[in-house]
Image (cartoon, grey):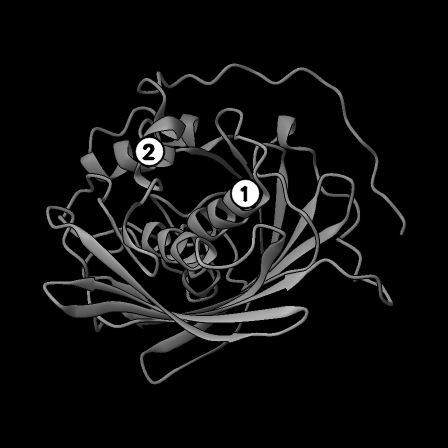
């Protein structure tokens, strides 16, 4: 596989002052308590508005399913539906159904429950590592390295708002949009193409299933952004209503979320108050590690 040039320049210091150990806070939330062999409980990150962050419950549900398969079987795909908004002040119960255990693959269906009703339903497939044919699409050429791209920590550093604080100082990941971000204002050009560098803000234990769960956690922050970018909107659009509906994800190769990853994103379609976001995730060396798709509800105020 052709590889992109590795850059070794020194990163500039962020202007924002992060809260202590935001990554450790996320890692603690991802530590589930076992009720029995197939049932687990967890808590949620505090979040403005009181609703559970979708990426958090995705990661927790994946880790609950992984607790029921042999350690050498890693998740290679998930397909999930967000059914109801979760409340951050209530515990979440994860109930795993063992669908199949074959010679190479295992399948699990997991429900994340609050007050006895599901907020997320997800099917996960696991596989023991095996040899086979291999190829992968290449990343775009001439992408600026993350050191030359402005961090969200800087973009939102002077914004005095609890949501801005949640996505910056309290964020476990450093996000750097190659194009101008759309946090505060629409993009200068309407396009469904977007590239984002992303990396955990600290070292992550060398447990591959945890890195894959954290990739699911992090990607939910950006999956629907190309839809807003395509239609000349921003996260600050008055009256904007946006929510994840379903999520599909495929891991192709081992991933390290504490190393820079490039999300190459598109939005192939929007219709009926829904839109589809897609992403290919590459390492800094140009290796394709994951492919993601998410459909979301996107409702804009009438002009």
Image point (42%, 60%), residue name: 65
User: What secondary structure is marked by label 1?
Assistant: helix
Where on the picture, by quarter, is residue 36?
bottom left
Image point (21%, 73%), residue name: 302
State the residue in front, 174 or 108. 108
Image point (26%, 30%), residue name: 159
* Number of numbered discs: 2
Residue 18: percent from the left, percent from the top? 35, 20
* Label 1 to label 2: alpha-carbon separation: 14 Å
For label 1, the residue is 211
Q: Residues within 10 Å of mark 2 (few under 14, many from 20)?
A: few
18 relative to 239, above or below: above
38 relative to 80, above or below: above
The C terminus, quarter of image: bottom left
User: What secondary structure is marked by label 2?
Assistant: helix
Report the residue that reaches farthest toward the right. 2
Left or right: 96 with respect to 137? left
Q: Residues within 10 Å of mark 1 (few under 14, many from 20)?
A: many
For label 2, the residue is 28
- Can residue 294 be seen by looking at this rendering? no
Q: Earlier in the sequence, mark 1 or mark 2?
A: 2
12 relative to 244, above or below: above
């Amino acid at each position: 596989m052709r590889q992109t040039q590795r850059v070794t320049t020194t990163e500039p210091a962020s202007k924002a002052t992060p809260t202590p150990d935001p990554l450790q806070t996320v890692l603690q939330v991802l530590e589930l308590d076992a009720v029995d062999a197939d049932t687990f409980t967890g808590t949620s990150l505090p979040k403005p508005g009181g609703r559970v962050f979708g990426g958090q419950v995705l990661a927790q549900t994946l880790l609950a399913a992984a607790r029921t398969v042999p350690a050498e079987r890693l998740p290679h795909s998930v397909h999930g539906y967000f059914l109801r908004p979760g409340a951050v002040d209530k515990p979440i119960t994860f109930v795993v159904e063992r669908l199949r255990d074959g010679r190479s693959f295992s399948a699990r269906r997991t429900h994340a429950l609050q007050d006895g009703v599901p907020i997320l339903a997800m099917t996960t497939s696991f596989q023991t590592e095996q040899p086979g044919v291999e190829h992968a699409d290449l990343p775009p050429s001439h992408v600026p390295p993350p050191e030359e791209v402005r961090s969200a920590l800087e973009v939102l550093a002077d914004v005095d708002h609890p949501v801005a604080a949640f996505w910056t100082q309290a964020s476990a990941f450093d996000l750097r949009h190659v194009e101008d971000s759309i946090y505060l204002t629409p993009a200068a050009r309407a396009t469904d193409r977007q590239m984002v560098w992303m990396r955990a803000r600290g070292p992550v234990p060398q447990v591959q299933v945890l890195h894959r769960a954290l990739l699911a956690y992090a990607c939910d922050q950006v999956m629907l952004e190309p839809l807003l970018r395509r239609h000349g909107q921003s996260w600050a659009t008055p009256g904007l209503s946006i929510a994840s509906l379903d999520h599909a994800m495929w891991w192709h190769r081992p991933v390290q979320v504490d190393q820079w990853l490039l999300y190459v994103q598109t939005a192939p379609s929007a219709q009926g108050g829904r839109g589809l976001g897609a992403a290919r995730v590459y390492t800094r060396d140009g290796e394709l590690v994951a492919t993601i798709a998410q459909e979301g509800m996107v409702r804009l105020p009438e002009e």
